[in-house]
Image (cartoon, grey):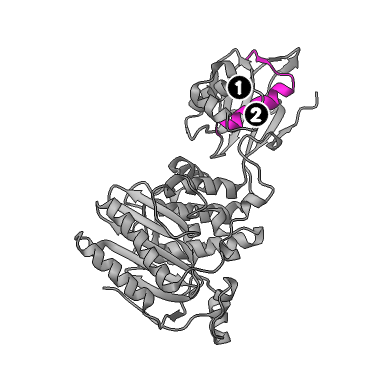
Amino acid sequence: MLQLFGSGLVSLWLDKAGVKVATVDPLEVLLWQSSPSLVLAPDRSPVASITVQQYLKSLQTLGVEANQGVWIQSGPVLLANHQGTVPIPAASLTKIATSIAALSTWGANYQFDTTVSTNGTISKGVLQGDLIVQGNGDPLFVWEEAIALGNTLQSMGINRVQGNLIITGTFAMNYNFNPVASGELLKQAFNAANWSNTVENQYLTLAPGTIRPQIVISGTVQQSQIVNPKQILLVRHRSLLLSQILKEMNVYSNNEMSEMLAYLLGGAQVVQQKAATAANVPLAEIQLVNGSGLGVENRISPRAACAMLMSIQKRLSPYQLTVADLFPVSGRDRRGTLLTRQIPLNTVIKTGTLNDVSALAGVMPTRDRGLVWFAIINRGSAIERFRNEQDRLLQNLLKQLQVAPVVPAALTPRLQDSNSQPLGEARRNEIMYKG
């Protein structure tokens, strides 16, 4: 049964979005500030509740009414709730939990290091010894990064490696967790003579004039758990900023990236605990078995999904970033999971899909309610119908709450205007060898 509540709005929250409303009781504001996910007041207006009731009726024809969850909230004001505190399979909404756990652990500007060392010497363009690559968990080390790293090594006078390519630590290339397989890809990237069409296509995305590396590695790719303390550090490669990594992960809903991050964080149970603590929701509302959302065992309540997104927004504020910097934005990110959706413009979203799960969570700017945070989770096999109904629900809700006259600063992406650097940027390769 749809649970509906009604009361006034809290002006402090809406003022931040450029919406002027009546003054509220200061005690209410103080209570809300202690927990951004806490609902202090229901909404007197039936607009959202009626719209959600209509949405649920449209699903009755599918015979799946009992397996739906909806939570819609504006600041501390609850607009609509249907089984919103019940944890249900949420598919890739799990990546919201992985994102907030990563942010709370490392911070938005964190970078993963990958180091390149040797146990030999460089003479006349030849490295007499092994090339040793030690990974530190970079989940977005791809062709562009490898090409740039190869060019940096070649600029140091290395054209040939007489020894082996040795992989240590946590190194994955192109989302491949197998260190030897990743090493083979790295070896291929270092020598343009061995490039496939896939590598050539990725090379074309780099800045015009980028050199094609031509480093020949004579030996084989090997894995080692032992780091020689006498090896000479050649290059320290730094990943993209964590905020950029999370954006790419969420735009494409990349399972391998999220699994790598969850592994580095300590596993699904650690992610679950960190996410629930950061969002200030009961641990029972976030139940995870992995960091990606693959499998119906990952269960999240709609309320928890909204609370996590709101907490992410708060944690990004010190970095002058917004939730729009970590998740796709309708009308702006025309790629990834947004390609076929009809979601209102400037809505920040995260999608989730399994064979019998369709989920959508995010935040939509409106004129009358400011930032409206929502989570919609459907269980059943009618995935396309679910998606269409989700989009229609947001469209109908926006008709009632009206389009915001301007995109509020709270939902304006800022990462693209910062000093962040693109994939394949050579400046993130620091030459350490002074010989």
Q: Could you say where residue 377 lies in the image, as x and y percent from the top left?
A: 34, 59
Q: Is residue 419 above or below residue 315?
A: above
Q: Is residue 258 above or below residue 413?
A: above
Q: Which residue is mark 1?
A: 190
The amino acid marked with disc number 1 is: Phe
CB under 8 Å between discs 2 and 1: yes
- The secondary element bearing badge 2 is classed as helix
Image mark count: 2
13 lies left or right of 84:
right
Query: In which quadrant of the rendered view does residue 408 lie?
Result: bottom right
277 or 226: which is nearer to us? 277
Q: Is residue 66 visible?
A: no
Q: Which residue is mark 2?
A: 149
- Image quadrant in which the N terminus is located: bottom left
Query: In which quadrant of the rendered view does residue 163 lie?
Result: top right
187 or 382: which is nearer to us? 382
Point 55% across, 87% down: residue: 25
Query: What stretch of residues is rendered in magenta?
Result: 142-163
Q: Who comes first in sequence, dot 2 or dot 1?
A: 2
108 lies left or right of 199:
right
375 lies left or right of 144:
left
Q: Is residue 235 above or below residue 196?
A: below
* Mark 2 surroundings: few (<14), some (14-19) or many (≥20) residues within 10 A: many
Query: In which quadrant of the rendered view does residue 82 lie?
Result: bottom left
User: Is 155 included in the stretch rendered in magenta?
Assistant: yes
- Image quadrant in which the C terminus is located: top right
Give the Cα distance between marks 2 and 1: 8 Å
Q: Residue furthest right?
A: 435
